[in-house]
Image: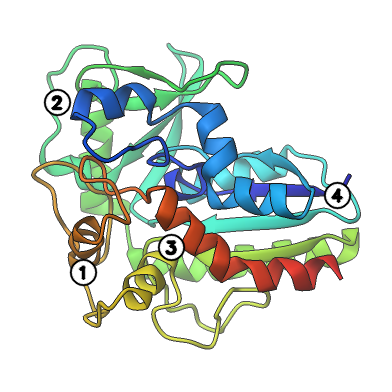
């Protein structure tokens, strides 16, 4: 069976597809990370089912580009694989936490609100690949990680440099996939990134606002695509007009701003012809 290998953040995983109209926030949070639901109703799941593909999924809620490249480094791709790879926000990263013996993701936009004196708990996701749901440790960001986040934002983060590096990483992986006989489709997920050149195999590479969030917004009547950079969505942190518009259209959830089942159906419709071309 041909494998559909998927990399990305929460939009690719399918956080949000468990939402049903009228759910309370607690009801939604109890189901939003269910792996089986994500596998079935996400755009990756819909496409895998339609084309009879085995979906090998590495996408995770809160994933960073750094994490995706690390996991790809450790995976054995096979000739004939089709890869869907979603580039996410540049304002994320991960570090190895020696006390916890695990990689920890962190968001640069949390620097403004995290507590440097917090106890050793994490606002992060720890993944058990054999579990039916993601395990999330409740509580504030660890104080050490909070301090690191603030230092990174102040001294060591450049969006433009991250985009420059992304272009060259994509180029490198394109060369590798060509050598291995693997087909790849790249896509910007939350924001349009202005790479120094249009990367090969990037969906809608010659178009402005090619990212999934912008295309979903435009396809449903939103025209102000020169919007703010979308980091993430949460109550009290509405950084993006596109997300707010899609909430009103019921294409993303009102509690986390992730695509609903209908949102994923529309994204699958966008991707279908590209996947068909890869399978010919």
Q: Quick one: which residue is furthest to the front in this view?
A: 22
Quadrant containing the N terminus is top right
Q: Residue 158 appears in which quarter of the rendering?
A: bottom left
User: Does any portion of residue 105 appear in the rendered image?
Assistant: yes
| Colouring convention used in this rendered image of the protein | rainbow
Residues under labels 3 and 2: Cα distance? 26 Å
In the shown orientation, is residue 200 left or right of residue 210?
Answer: right
Task: Determine which residue is flagged by label 1.
Answer: 228
Residues under labels 1 and 3: Cα distance? 17 Å
Single out the mark in the foreground, 1 or 3: 1
Q: Residue at x 89, y 56 (%)?
A: 80
Q: Position of residue 226 (x, y in %)?
A: 24, 80
Residues under labels 4 and 2: Cα distance? 47 Å
* The one of 96 and 133 positioned closer to us in this rendering: 133
Q: Residue at x 48, y 71 (%)?
A: 164
2 or 1: tag closer to the N-terminus: 2
Cβ atoms at labels 1 and 3 below 8 Å apart: no
Element type at mark 1: loop
Cβ atoms at labels 2 and 1 below 8 Å apart: no
Task: Determine which residue is flagged by label 2.
Answer: 116
């Amino acid at each position: 069976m041909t494998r559909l290998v998927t990399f990305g953040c929460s939009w690719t995983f399918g956080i949000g597809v468990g939402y049903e109209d009228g759910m309370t926030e607690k009801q939604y949070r109890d189901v939003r990370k269910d792996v089986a639901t994500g596998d079935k109703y996400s755009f990756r799941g819909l496409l895998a089912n339609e084309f009879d593909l085995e979906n090998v999924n590495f996408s995770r809620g809160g994933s960073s580009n750094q994490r995706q490249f690390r996991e790809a480094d450790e995976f054995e791709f096979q000739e004939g694989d089709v890869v869907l790879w979603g580039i996410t926000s540049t304002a994320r990263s991960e570090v190895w936490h020696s006390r916890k013996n695990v990689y920890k993701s962190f968001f640069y936009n949390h620097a403004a609100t995290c507590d440097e004196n917090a106890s050793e708990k994490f606002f992060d996701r720890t993944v058990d690949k054999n579990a039916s749901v993601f395990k999330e440790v409740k509580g504030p960001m660890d104080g050490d990680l909070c301090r690191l986040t603030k230092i990174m934002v102040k001294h060591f983060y450049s969006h433009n440099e991250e985009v420059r590096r992304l272009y060259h990483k994509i180029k490198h992986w394109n060369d590798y996939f060509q050598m291995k006989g693997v087909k790849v489709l790249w896509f910007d997920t939350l924001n349009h990134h202005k790479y120094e050149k249009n990367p090969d195999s990037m969906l809608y590479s010659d178009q402005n606002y090619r990212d999934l969030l912008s295309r979903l917004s435009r396809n449903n009547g939103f025209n102000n695509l020169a919007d703010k950079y979308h980091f993430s969505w949460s109550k009290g942190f509405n950084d993006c007009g596109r997300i707010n518009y899609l909430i009103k259209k019921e294409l993303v959830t009102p509690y986390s701003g992730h695509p609903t089942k209908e949102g994923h159906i529309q994204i699958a419709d966008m991707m279908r012809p590209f996947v068909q071309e890869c399978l010919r």
